[in-house]
Amino acid sequence: MTDTTLTPTDRVATIAAAPPEKPGFNWGRALAWTFMVLMIIVTLFPFYWMLRTALSSNSALYAGSNSLLPVKPSLGGFERVFGLQTGQAAVDAGGAGQSISFWRYLLNSTVVATLITVGQVFFSAMAAYAFARLRWRHREKVFGVFLIGLMIPAIFTLLPNFVLIKQLGLVDTLLGIALPSMLMTPFAVFFLRQFFLGISREVEEAALVDGASKVRVFFQLVIPMSTAPIATLSILTYIAAWNDYFWPLMVSYTDASRVLTVGLGVFKSQTPQTGPDWAGLMAATLVAALPMLLLFGAFAKRIVNSIGFSGIK
């Protein structure tokens, strides 16, 4: 009788010589990718339509409303926004003929968003460190009460803030717009506290043993170790401050303090009798949104990773 027992070497050779099995078609993965592509198209289509309208001739928009491409391509909308078009040329193109202080509004938005971001992140970081590391009576209870602020709609605070800003004489000023949001917020404190709790206590205790004070530990040890969540919070705060509309509308009355979002409303209010200047309005909206889109696109991965690392679900 012939011995047909295969040695381990023969088994390996047989397996290596066998043709690899072709994986079957994964319908679940295909459906998932199809859904993701559709969601991306649905999300990006409004921005494409905004660009298409901005590059169209205002007088030809209604005639070519079904076209997916710009109708009679023109840069007139951007020229009206930047003040590069004369009043009569703007009227002939379907605009209002009145220029807006676009660069002034852009500067005001930059100043206000910067003040809010710097102040809010700084004060929120100090409060978060106090809740995470300092030991004081009823700390957890105070933090719980502090988090209740997350459940209070922002619209409830508009009137008290306006009365306070008016009494301080800061109406129609950039500081008056930025001041109510420059201090700590419940979300910012919670966000940074979650990260501070993950920092090793041994590192801080070693610095304290070497003679460093709590203030020095915070600024020279904790802050440098927390650059990722602080950068993420700064980006989110800057975007929110840049897009804010209702509060700046309540406080600002002249071009000296109007931000870009309010300036878009002014641009829309200058509607000629022939109809809205859709090309100019979409051009202004696109220019206003483009910096934030680029900022979020550049740091999207860091924002998602930092939020997940901080324990926010």
Image (cartoon, rainbow, N blue to C red):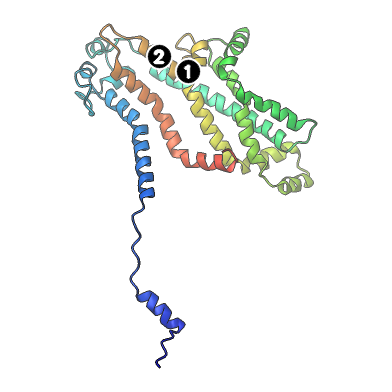
Q: Position of residue 104 (x, y in %)?
A: 43, 17
Relative to 57, say whether 266 is above or below. above
Residue occupying image coordinates x 64% and y 38%: 194
Q: Position of residue 261 (x, y in %)?
A: 43, 19
Q: Is residue 209 left or right of residue 145?
A: right
Q: Which residue is mark 2?
A: 265
Which image quarter is the C terminus in? top right
Mark 1 lies on a secondary structure that is loop
Residue occupying image coordinates x 62% and y 44%: 225
Sequence-first disc among 2 and 1: 1
Task: Examine the rendering and report whether any part of residue 23 can be seen.
Answer: yes
Q: Nearer the viewer, residue 108 or 163?
A: 163
Q: Is residue 26 left or right of residue 249?
A: left
Residue 309, quarter of picture: top right
Relative to 212, say whether 263 is above or below. above
Amino acid at pointer 2? Gly
